[in-house]
């Protein structure tokens, strides 16, 4: 039973958050849109002029554009495949009765709490360096040629690092979902002689479907914005081999000082992320009964 | 018979799970171990698992680049932005949980949607605004940004916790003639504290590890550990042991906090879509 006065109070309590988020979203986004329509280079201040959609044309015809799109998609899909696939297997494994379950779970989710710059540099140097890294040593121990990860397969190396960071997230979410699975149903199926693979396909997977979708959507939103790992390992190179969309926009605006061009790229990134966000928001919305 | 089989099964799964767990954890373990080696031991082939530990790297890391300053920056930025976000978010979440209107759900969804905007879409204007207002490489500027990017998650988490507080208790207190202030202090605050603490925990972790704005808006003075560690991407000479020492100190506090926050992680990062 809300009175008029309490309504007004409620509105007053919500308004600081609304105003701040509105400012945070509308003002910079509006500026990005405006900049994207200008010829605007930080090295030539005072020469800004209206350019219409020219920046968008330049952005889409930039020789780095298609590689960046391809790299962004490869990165997102590669990490998703590894983390969702691995996450399902790990969630099932950790859901079994095992000794020291709590400790194993702690070990598995630990990488999620490591800051991106640390993950990237530790992997690049101490794991993947062909001379001094552990993988190089392992390869030589088994009589193989060490792989120069960042030289020969830079994008794959970044996918490995990012997957290590996100596997815990997928595992934790899917494990939470696993634990709400009715174990009687599984036992009944087992009694009826359903083989493990059949039980997985017909009982476990349908039960996890929703959680898997959520993991995919949330990871996609974060993976579309991968930046730090690339900055500290390859700087987008060699050439454009590891330049993704965020890195391309960063390079255009803060390294080449082309504000107009970078802004056009930024708007493109926003549109791309929004396509995913719409699906995610729809799923979340169904779960709120406010 | 059935029992023997299930014990054997349990041991098998245990071995497998531990092997996988240790494999995933290994890079962290290796970093911690390496931080106590000499630089020569750190690159030794075959890798040394047994060695004479030394604390030299920790001393070097501090003396060469004032590590303490960057550590303090991380502490101030993550705590400061979290407290600021809580101050703004608590009233909002409160009102939405206890005085929901027709538009509350839409409002909440809109708030979450701001979290899904890619940072790179507003990089240029934020950078220019910061430059013009002299906020580049300042803790104040970065704290404002960290507060704003995490505000939607904070509001969202608080909202889900507050909604679990039964509304009848409020009604009862009101019937007894409690003033709004007394109602908050004596009835609601005690019930809200666990939710607020959980929210705080998760937000500190997110702010501590944020690595887009910290890298783009700081250079030296205000740089937190995420940005400081990045300086090891162009190293001189042997640096594995020093990198490890700097990394160990940077991740240790958050690992500990993180292990306490597993449940909140699921709640906070899936926006309640998985329970």
Image (spheres, coloured by chain):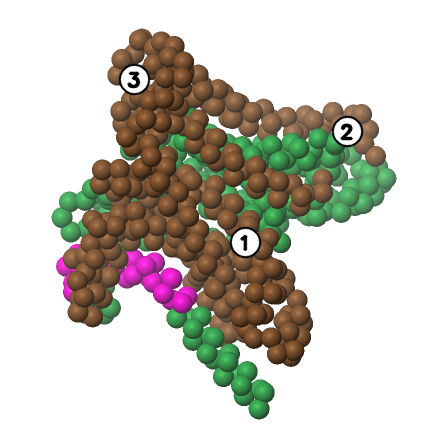
Residue denoted by label 2? A6
Q: CA distance from mark 3 to mark 1?
A: 44 Å
Along the line of sight, the residue nearer the viewer: B216 or B74: B216
Q: Is residue B22 magenta?
A: yes
- Tell me the CA gap for discs 3 and 2: 50 Å
Q: Earlier in the sequence, mark 3 or mark 1?
A: 3
Mark 3 highlights which residue? A42
Residue at the disc numbered 1: A212
Q: From this viewpoint, is residue A219 visible?
A: yes
Residue A27 picture location, percent across and down: 49, 20
Query: Given the image, what chain letter belongs to the residue carrying mark 2?
Result: A
- Count residues near mark 2 (Cα–Cα under 10 Å), then give few for <14, some for 14-19, many for 20+: few
* A174 and B173: which is toward the camera: A174
Chain part drawn in magenta = B20-46
The N terminus of chain B appears in which quarter of the rendering? bottom right
Query: Does residue A22 appear left or right of residue B105 in this picture?
Result: left
- Alpha carbon separation for disc pair 1 and 2: 41 Å
Drawn colour of chain A? brown
Q: Earlier in the sequence, mark 1 or mark 2?
A: 2
User: Chain B drawn in what color?
Assistant: green
Q: Is residue A287 left or right of residue A140?
A: right
**Which mark is nearer the camera, 1 or 2?**
1
Element under disc 2:
helix
Q: Position of residue B82 (x, y in %)?
A: 50, 39
Classify mark 1: residues with Cα within 10 Å, few (<14), some (14-19) or many (20+).
many
């Amino acid at each position: 039973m809300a009175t008029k006065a309490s309504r007004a109070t409620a509105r007053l309590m919500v308004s600081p958050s609304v105003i701040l988020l509105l400012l945070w979203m509308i003002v910079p986004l509006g500026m990005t849109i405006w900049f994207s329509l200008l010829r605007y280079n930080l090295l030539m201040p005072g020469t800004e002029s209206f350019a219409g959609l020219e920046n968008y044309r330049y952005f889409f015809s930039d020789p780095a554009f298609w590689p960046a799109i391809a790299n962004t998609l490869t990165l997102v899909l590669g990490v998703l495949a590894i983390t969702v696939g691995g996450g399902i297997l790990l969630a099932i494994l950790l859901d079994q009765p095992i000794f020291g379950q709590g400790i194993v779970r702690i070990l598995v989710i630990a990488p999620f709490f490591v800051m991106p710059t640390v993950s990237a540099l530790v992997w690049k140097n101490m794991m993947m360096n062909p001379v001094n890294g552990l993988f190089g040593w392992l390869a030589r121990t088994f009589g193989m040629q060490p792989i120069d990860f960042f030289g020969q397969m830079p994008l794959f190396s970044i996918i490995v690092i990012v997957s290590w960071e996100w596997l815990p997230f997928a595992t934790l979410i899917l494990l939470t979902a696993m634990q709400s699975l009715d174990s009687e149903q599984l036992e009944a199926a087992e009694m009826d002689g359903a083989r493990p693979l059949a039980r997985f396909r017909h009982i476990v997977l349908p039960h996890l479907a929703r959680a898997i979708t959520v993991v995919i959507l949330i990871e996609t939103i974060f993976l579309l914005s991968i930046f730090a790992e690339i900055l500290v390992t390859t700087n987008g190179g060699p050439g454009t081999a590891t330049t993704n969309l965020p890195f391309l926009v960063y390079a255009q605006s803060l390294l080449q000082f082309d504000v107009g061009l970078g802004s056009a790229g930024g708007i493109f990134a926003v549109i791309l992320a929004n396509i995913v966000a719409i699906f995610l928001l729809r799923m979340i919305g169904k779960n709120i009964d406010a | 018979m059935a029992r023997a089989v299930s014990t054997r099964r349990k041991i098998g799964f245990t071995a497998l799970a531990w092997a996988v767990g240790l494999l995933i954890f290994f890079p962290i373990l290796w970093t911690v171990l390496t931080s106590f080696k000499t630089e020569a031991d750190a690159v030794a082939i075959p890798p040394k698992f047994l060695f004479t530990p030394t604390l030299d790297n920790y001393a070097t890391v501090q003396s060469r680049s004032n590590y303490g300053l960057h550590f303090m920056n991380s502490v101030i930025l993550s705590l400061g932005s979290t407290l600021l976000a809580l101050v703004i978010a608590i009233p909002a979440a409160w009102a939405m949980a206890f005085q929901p209107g027709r538009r509350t759900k839409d409002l909440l969804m809109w708030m979450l949607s701001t979290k899904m905007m890619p940072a790179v879409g507003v990089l240029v204007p934020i950078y220019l605004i910061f430059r013009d207002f002299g906020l580049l490489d300042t803790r104040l500027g970065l704290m404002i940004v960290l507060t704003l990017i995490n505000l939607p998650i904070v509001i969202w988490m608080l909202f889900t916790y507050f909604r679990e507080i039964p509304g009848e208790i409020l009604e009862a207190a009101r019937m007894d003639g409690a003033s709004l202030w007394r109602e908050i202090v004596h009835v609601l605050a005690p019930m809200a504290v666990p939710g607020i603490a959980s929210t705080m925990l998760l937000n500190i972790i997110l702010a501590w590890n944020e690595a887009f704005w910290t890298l783009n808006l700081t250079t030296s003075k205000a740089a937190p550990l995420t940005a400081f560690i990045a300086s090891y991407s162009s190293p001189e000479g042997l640096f594995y042991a020093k990198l490890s020492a700097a990394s160990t100190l940077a991740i240790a506090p958050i690992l500990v906090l993180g292990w306490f926050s597993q449940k909140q992680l699921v709640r906070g990062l899936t926006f309640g879509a998985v329970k």
